[in-house]
Image (cartoon, helix red, strand yellow):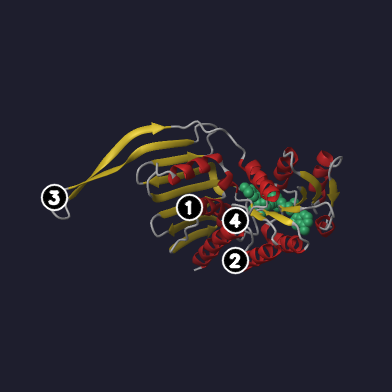
Amino acid sequence: MNIALIGYGYWGPNLARNILEIDEARLVGICEMNPARLERARSLYGDRVEIYTDNYKDLILHPDVDAVVIATQTEPSYQIIMESLHAGKHCFIEKPIASTVERAENIKKIAEESRLIVHCDHIMVFNPIIRYVKKMLDNGELGELMYIDISRINLGPIRKDVNAMLDLAVHDIAVIDYLSNGEQPNGLSALGQVLYGSQESITYLTLKYPNFIAHIKSSWVSPMKERRMMIAGSKKMVIFDDVKLTEKLTIYDHGFDITSYEEYGHYEVETRTGDIFIPNIKYEDSLKNSVLHFVECFRNNNLSLTGPDHSLRVMRILEEAMNSLRK
Ligand SMILES: NC(=O)c1ccc[n+]([C@@H]2O[C@H](COP(=O)([O-])OP(=O)(O)OC[C@H]3O[C@@H](n4cnc5c(N)ncnc54)[C@H](O)[C@@H]3O)[C@@H](O)[C@H]2O)c1
C-alpha cells in the first residue's frame, strides 16, 4: 500500500514511523505546511520520502498513492478527506472522523459509493487489553455488562478546534461501541467548563444504554495523567490502568450473589469477593495495530472495524453530547 501522509504536527510523526515499520506499506510523501515541522520531516526522511509544503492536492493526485493518511487538525481534515475520496484514494482518518454528523455521513456516502476503505484511527479499539476484555464479554466470563466508568485526564495540550470531550472521550465512546457491539445510548447528559481558551477543557459525560450505564471524565487540566477504565460485568469486574507499564489489567472475581426465598419478593444480596487475577497480556502498540488493520483491509478488500458505520455511531453520540453541553 503506497501511502501519503498529510499533517506532520504532534501525531503525524508517530504515524510516519509506524507506516515505515510495516513491510507491506510504503510512505510515498509527507505534506506539512508549517516550515519548522516540515524541516523536521525532511531531516528524518528526506532521503526516502517526497516532501510537500502546502500543495497537498499534488500529493493526493500522485499516481503511486493508493491511500491518504490525514493527521491535520479536525477542521481542515474534512476537505482533504473529500478530495482524497473523490480522487479514488483510501483514507486513514485521525479521530474524530469529522466535526459534525453531517460531514461524517458525507464521508460514509462517498466511501460506500466509490468502494473505498475509510478507517478512523480509534486506536483503543486496537489495544490488546481492550481486545482481551472484549473476549471476556463475548465468552460470558464477565457476565452481563452493568457499567463502565472511565477517566482520561492529563495536563494539556489545550486544543483550539475541539473541546476535551471531542478530543479524549471519542476514544472511550469508540471502545464502548466496540465492547457492546454497536449499542446506542437511549439517553445522555454532558457538563463541561471552559477554563482556558474557548473550548471546554474538562467534561463529564454520562451515557444511559438500554442495559448498562457509562460515565466518562475527560480533562486537559489535571496535575496527573490517568487512563483508567472500570468495566463491571454481572460475574466479574475489571480495571484497565493504561498508565501502568505492566500489569495493566486486573480482573476481580467480585460481585453479588442473590439468594431468593420461598416467600414472594423476599431475597438476600450477598457480597462475593473472590480471587484477583492479573493476566499476562503481550504488549502491542495500538497505533501500529491500527495502521496494520488499515493495510490488511486494503490487501484483503475488507471493511475496517472502525470504518464509517462505527465512526458515525461514535459521531452521533458526540454531537448529541455537544448539544447537551451547550444546553
Ligand atoms: N489517535 C490518537 O490517539 C491521536 C492522538 C493525538 C492526536 N490525534 C489526532 O491527530 C490529529 C492531529 O493532531 P495533532 O495533535 O498532531 O495536531 P497538530 O496541530 O500538532 O498537527 C496538525 C498538523 O497538520 C498541519 N496541517 C494542517 N492543515 C494542513 C494542510 N492543508 N496541509 C498540510 N499540513 C496541514 C498543521 O500545520 C499541523 O502541523 C487530530 O485529529 C487529533 O485528534 C489522534
Ligand 1 within 8 Å of disc 1? The answer is no
Mark positioned earlier in the residue sequence (2 or 4): 2
Residue 83 in percent (x, y) is at 76, 63
* Residue hosting label 4: 196
> What is the secondary structure assignment of the residue under circle 2?
helix
Q: Residue furthest left?
A: 263
For label 1, the crowd category at 10 Å Cα-Cα, with few meaning under 14, some 14 to 19 and many 20 or more, is many
Residue name at image x 45 percent, y 61 percent: 185
Residue 40 lies left or right of residue 233; in this view the side is: right
Q: Which mark is residue 101?
A: 2
Mark 3 or mark 2: which is in front?
A: 3
> What is the secondary structure assignment of the residue under circle 4?
loop
Ligand 1 within 8 Å of disc 2? The answer is no
Q: Which mark is residue 262?
A: 3
Q: CA distance from mark 1 to mark 4?
A: 21 Å
Q: CA distance from mark 1 to mark 2?
A: 21 Å
Residue name at image x 54 percent, y 43 percent: 223
For label 2, the crowd category at 10 Å Cα-Cα, with few meaning under 14, some 14 to 19 and many 20 or more, is many
* Residue hosting label 1: 216
Q: Are marks 3 and 1 in contact (CB under 8 Å)?
A: no
Q: CA distance from mark 3 to mark 1?
A: 41 Å
| Residue type at tag 3 | Glu
